[in-house]
């Protein structure tokens, strides 16, 4: 891609996107689909299923409403966990940036928790809080909150001293300081943290639905795997992959939007 | 007299150069916060939680018993060996595939789409499928660890080997370097920074992959140790395993950095 010329016209951009899409279809999707079909037809049915029957299974899961139901349950869990992580992470991130003593004291413990593999805490959540929606949402929250908290804190600390001094010399109180200066400055950092939280949240949802009370896409995956319905397992895995790609794309767009807004 | 008192005070302050005033204050603050957090945990666990819920004092009390339990060390060994083994396979495969994607246009077009898509997929979601392939065995754990570490390394090796400084390639070309020398002698070292962040990501994913595999498959390891102990109301013992797991993660990261400093000391020198 080293020979790409700067494209300024809209038609040029559209043409280059068309070339890119054609490349993906020609070099990646078609051979991949062919390989999938061939392997699926030669391998034993308990191990792999051809693409055609996977697509059929996908249609069946959509038709029966199973997939919509699972997507709804997982989506609600995801929104609850990542949403609360956004609110808590952004607020405490700014608070820690403002209150130096609190930040200095808490920082090593936040970093230690950030480094802890969250999946290892699942059994504790299970045996302390039991089954139900709240423990699962708590797990998703724990997966998602730390990148938002840490990056927001770094961002809010980077407010320029001159602006803070101007605000102070105009007798700005802490509330209007947040509203007019710190929050607008910090939003792009929150968006960066949210991009990471979006990815980690999905891991949290699938883990919660596997290892805490079964629901949504996780339950569907395990159920079909226990029945050795290979095509259905592949279909749901495909849906989760697609969901991951879409969510990551959304996160990247969000981050870029705020990044351009910052400058 | 007053001057006599004042001078040593200043000298004493100056002689403690490695620990600045700020460092002393912040260290004190951090230790204090740690104590406050532990006390808050202890008190709230005593007030609101059932007796089996882990609390700091009990975790400390079970330490000798856990450390003298051969089962604990067998579990730790099992997980560590699987993680290192899978990490090694995943990193080697990831470097080869990533370099090939970065150097060969055809492979880039064929594989980039899949590697990127799988990279965004939570590897936990692959567990049911992999269990169907390998059954409830330690092969499932190894496979998850390999996939989890392969993808970030391949992505980063690809990113790094795509943008090699032109001069390097021209020099290699003018000396008629064979292709494998260009790959492993030029492309690999110049993408080292990318590779390192890939390996660090891989180490984290490998550890998480091993733990979730142990949860679902039920094979011996730290993840299973945590699960079985907390299910039999021994959260304190399980918490020791979580601490060890965190320690392993930190050591893996430090180990990567130390290995770079030891074996690739030319790296960072220019930075």
Image (cartoon, coloured by chain):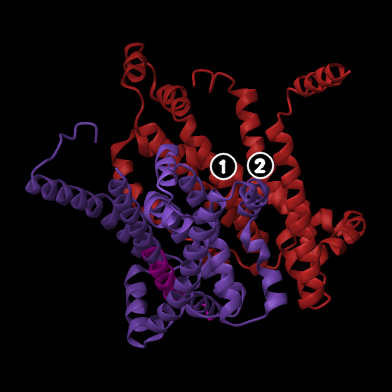
Chain colours: A purple, B red
The residue at which mark 1 appears reads as B200
Q: Quadrant of residue B23?
A: top right
Number of residues whose C-alpha sits closer than 10 Å to that of mark 2, classed few (under 14), some (14–19) or many (20 or more): some
- Residue A238 lies in the magenta stretch: yes
- The secondary element bearing badge 1 is classed as helix
Does residue A105 appear in this view?
yes
Left or right, A118 with respect to A5, comes to: right
Q: Residue furthest bottom?
A: A64
Does residue B136 appear in this view?
no
Residue B68's x, y, as percent? 92, 55
The residue at which mark 2 appears reads as B252
On-image quarter of the C terminus of chain A: top left
Residue B72's x, y, as percent? 83, 57
Q: In this picture, which residue range is highlighted in magenta? A: A227-242
- Residue B3 lies in the magenta stretch: no
Residue B162's x, y, as percent? 35, 33
Left or right, A97 with respect to B5, comes to: left
Q: Indicate whether A85 appears above or below B99.
A: below
Pointer 1 with pointer 2, Cβ within 8 A: no
């Amino acid at each position: 891609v080293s020979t790409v010329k700067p494209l300024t016209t809209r038609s040029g951009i559209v043409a280059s996107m068309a070339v890119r899409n054609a490349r993906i279809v020609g070099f990646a999707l078609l051979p991949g689909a062919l390989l999938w079909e061939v392997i699926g037809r030669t391998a034993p049915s308990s191990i792999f299923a051809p693409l055609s029957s996977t697509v059929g299974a996908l249609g069946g899961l959509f038709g029966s409403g199973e997939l919509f139901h699972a997507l709804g349950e997982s989506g609600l869990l995801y929104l609850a966990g990542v949403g609360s992580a956004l609110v808590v992470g952004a607020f405490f991130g700014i608070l820690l940036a403002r209150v130096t003593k609190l930040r200095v004291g808490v920082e090593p413990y936040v970093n230690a928790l950030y480094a802890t593999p969250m999946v290892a805490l699942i059994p504790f959540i299970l045996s302390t809080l039991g089954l139900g929606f709240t423990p699962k949402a708590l797990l998703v929250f724990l997966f998602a909150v730390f990148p938002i908290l840490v990056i927001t804190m770094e961002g809010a600390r980077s407010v320029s001293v001159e602006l803070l001094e101007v605000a102070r010399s105009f007798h700005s109180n802490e509330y209007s300081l947040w509203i007019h200066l710190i929050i607008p400055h910090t939003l792009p950092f929150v968006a960066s943290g949210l991009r990471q939280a979006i990815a980690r949240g999905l891991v949290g949802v699938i883990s919660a639905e596997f290892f805490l009370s079964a629901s949504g896409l996780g339950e569907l995956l395990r159920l079909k795997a226990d029945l050795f319905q290979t095509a259905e397992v592949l279909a749901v895995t495909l849906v989760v992959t697609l969901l991951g790609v879409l969510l990551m794309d959304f996160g990247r767009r969000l981050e870029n939007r705020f990044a351009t807004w910052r400058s | 007299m007053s001057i006599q008192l004042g001078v040593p005070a200043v000298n004493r302050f100056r002689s403690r150069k490695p620990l600045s005033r700020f460092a002393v204050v912040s260290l004190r603050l951090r230790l204090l916060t740690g104590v406050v957090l532990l006390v808050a945990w202890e008190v709230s666990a005593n007030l609101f939680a059932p007796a089996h819920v882990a609390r700091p004092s009990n975790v400390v009390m079970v330490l000798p018993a856990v450390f003298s339990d051969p089962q604990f060390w067998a579990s730790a060994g099992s997980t560590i060996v699987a993680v290192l083994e899978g990490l090694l396979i995943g990193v080697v495969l990831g470097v080869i595939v990533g370099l090939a994607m970065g150097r060969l246009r055809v492979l880039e077009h064929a594989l980039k789409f899949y590697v990127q898509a799988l990279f965004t997929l939570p590897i936990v979601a692959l567990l049911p499928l992999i269990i169907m392939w390998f059954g409830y065995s330690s092969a499932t754990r190894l496979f998850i660890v390999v996939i989890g570490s392969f993808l970030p390394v391949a992505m980063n090796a690809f990113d790094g080997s795509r943008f090699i400084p032109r001069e390097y390639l021209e020099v290699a070309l003018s000396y008629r370097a064979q292709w494998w020398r260009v790959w492993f002698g030029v492309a690999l070292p110049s993408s080292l920074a990318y590779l390192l962040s890939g390996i660090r990501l891989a180490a984290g994913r490998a550890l998480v992959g091993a733990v979730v595999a142990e949860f679902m498959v039920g094979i011996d390891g730290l993840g299973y140790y945590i699960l079985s102990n907390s299910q039999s109301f021994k959260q304190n013992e399980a918490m020791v395993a979580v601490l060890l797991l965190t320690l392993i993660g930190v050591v893996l990261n430090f180990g990567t950095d130390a290995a770079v400093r030891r074996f690739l000391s030319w790296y960072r020198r220019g930075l």
